[in-house]
Amino acid sequence: MFHSSKQYWIAVALATCLVLAGVCTFLYQVYTGIGIWGLNSPVFWAFDITNFVFWIGISHAGTLISAILRLANATWRRPVTRCAEAITVFAVTIGAIIPVCHIGRPWLAYYLIPYPSERHIWPNFRSPLAWDFFAIITYLTGSTSFLLLPMIPDWAAVRDCSTGLRKKIYGTLSLGWQGTPRQWHRLETAMHIMSIVIVPVAVSVHTIVSWDFAMTPVPMWHSTIFGPYFVVGAIFSGIAGLILAMALLRKFLHLEDYLRPIHFQNLGKLLLTMSLLWFYFTFAERLTTWYGNDPSEMAVFWSSIRQNFAPMFWTMVVCNFIIPVPILAIKKLRTITGTCIASVGIVIGMWIERFLIIVPALEHKFLPYTYGHYQPTWAEMTLMASSFGLMFLLYLLFAKFVPVISVWEMKAGLHHPSATPHASTVTEVPIRSGFDDNPLPSDV
Amino acid sequence: MRAIYTLCPDPDCAQRVVDTLRVAGLDLGFAADQVVVVSGEPYEGYNFSDRYAKSYMFPLAAVGGLVGGTCGYLLTSLTQKAYPLPTGGMPIVPPWTNGIIVYELTMLGAILTTLIYMFVAAPLPSFGAHVTDPEIWTGKILVGVTDPPESSSAGIEKAFRQAGASEIKRFPAPPASPVTR
């Protein structure tokens, strides 16, 4: 429908291949059974739950940051919010798909839903897995609304500035938005309420994900610090993911006038804060374990610090702390390139962190005769690669069909009393729909 | 729907036109609610916009939260009482863990109520014909009168000019006159 560059279609094709590989692996897994994964007794959770926690963590980029910046009335947020909110919706969706793969019999996934079963099997509301269901449903509903509501006026703009099939499609998507003062006030009030509600929901979601572990008497899982530790880690990886997404959009959509160095610098400062917080929590967690010197916990502790998981552990520390802190602390290094390098490291480091929380603990439970060893298989790795492919594919399609910068919010920002000098230099806000090479008004 | 409208370059001009039309409406035979303002971005601090600012969205969201929380409490506690699990002496209806589900459903209730209220009050979807102009997306503000009495067109145009608006348009746009050779 739209003209797009060759690179765009190559990227879509690559992402689609990854997704198809994942679909084929999943179908093969359904046919043969979950035995094709490397899971065993006692390591019943590994790659898949690592990916689940990782993607739910990445999802904290968008809605949480966007909501906090909205409530703080930070004008520099305006070009950033939609990129961020889209990450949330896609990451939560991917995160929600993973447990369905994990249960092995996906056609029974509806057992998670509270319904009156003729066999009197009800979800156990004391289980953190049941809490997950409610938390993720609430977060997905809130995040999707948070993303879609401000898109309605932008879709109306595309509708009014286009013809033919495009006009019909965007006319439907915009729900007949007119732009009366009543509509603007209702939209802004709704966004304000959403911003207030979504912050505690986002915090609760990752806290509940952490309780999947912390409510279990497994060494180094049963910890009171896990809730805030996971929330900090989620925001940390989320901001890194957001910076990478913004950098890619900036480069390929030529959004240099909107996604400016100041945005990367400000997000870099947030990332620095989260890096320091992450180190604080990691140190506090390990120090408490070491000081307690409980034999079962020390087995997990040493396996990650000195033994077979040590390379991963120290890679994590380098990626999450040693590399990012100097880059983000020194203003000259806190450039777009600098923040992107730090972000790549953090995304890798945070994935490793999730893995190190899950696998070493399960390999070293309380009794040595239950010790085990986990080795991922091709199926798990393919599914993981596929989850990244799905994220890229969804984001590419999103960038093509939706204005990735909130046009009306940018314009409103120009008239806002607290508009920054940077913002005031942007005088024209062309309505672009993603990878379309021509601004839409020229099609009229 | 018919309309006669002008495009104002800034909100001050829009406010002038709205004020003039409201006064002129008394003589020309149209009501104040027939005066329509359409813009490509929200404006604050102007009467034509701020008069719509008041809404019941916040209290209704709170009520929605209460309803959601109550549903969460009933879902968990009634289920646990109807199908009691062996808990080893622990409470059948545990307030701590049920509180988590009550909390999530409270938030979900507030979100859904906000959404429903927004769509009802906006109102959306609204696929009928309504006055619009692509130029609102370039920063102009549409101010006009919907379904004006036939006899009042000249008076409305005069009111537009009095308020400083020069470009006057009609909705739907009149068909282009045939070209004569």
Image: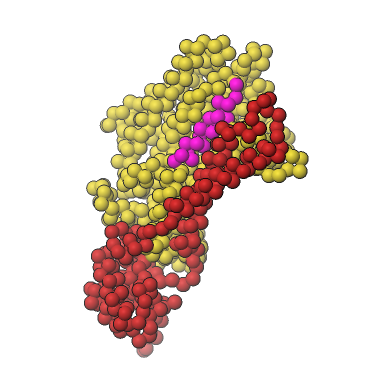
Whether residue B123 is visible here, answered yes or no, is yes
Q: Of A387 and A82, which appears nearest the observer?
A: A82
Dividing the image into 4 quarters, which one contains the C terminus of chain A?
bottom left
Taking the image as shown, residue B117 lies to the left or right of residue A378, namely left
B120 or A284: which is nearer to us? B120
Looking at the picture, does residue B99 appear above or below residue B165? above
| Percent coordinates x, y for residue A146 in the rendering | 46, 49
Which x, y percent locates residue A164? Answer: 48, 67
Q: Which chain is represented by red in the image?
A: B
The colour chain A appears in is: yellow
**Which colour style is shown?**
by chain
Within the image, what quadrant is residue A346 found in?
top left
Tell me if A266 is positioned left or right of A160 in this view.
left
Report the span colored magenta. Answer: A199-217
Kindly report the secondary structure that dominates the magenta region of the rendered protein: helix
* Residue A203 belongs to the span the image colors magenta: yes
Q: Is residue A20 visible?
A: no
Instruction: Name the spot of residue B39 as percent of width and height, x first.
Output: 35, 64
Specify whether residue A247 is painted magenta.
no
Numbered-mark total? 0
- Give the vertical position of A332 relative to A254 (above or below): above
Residue A159: x, y in percent?
44, 64
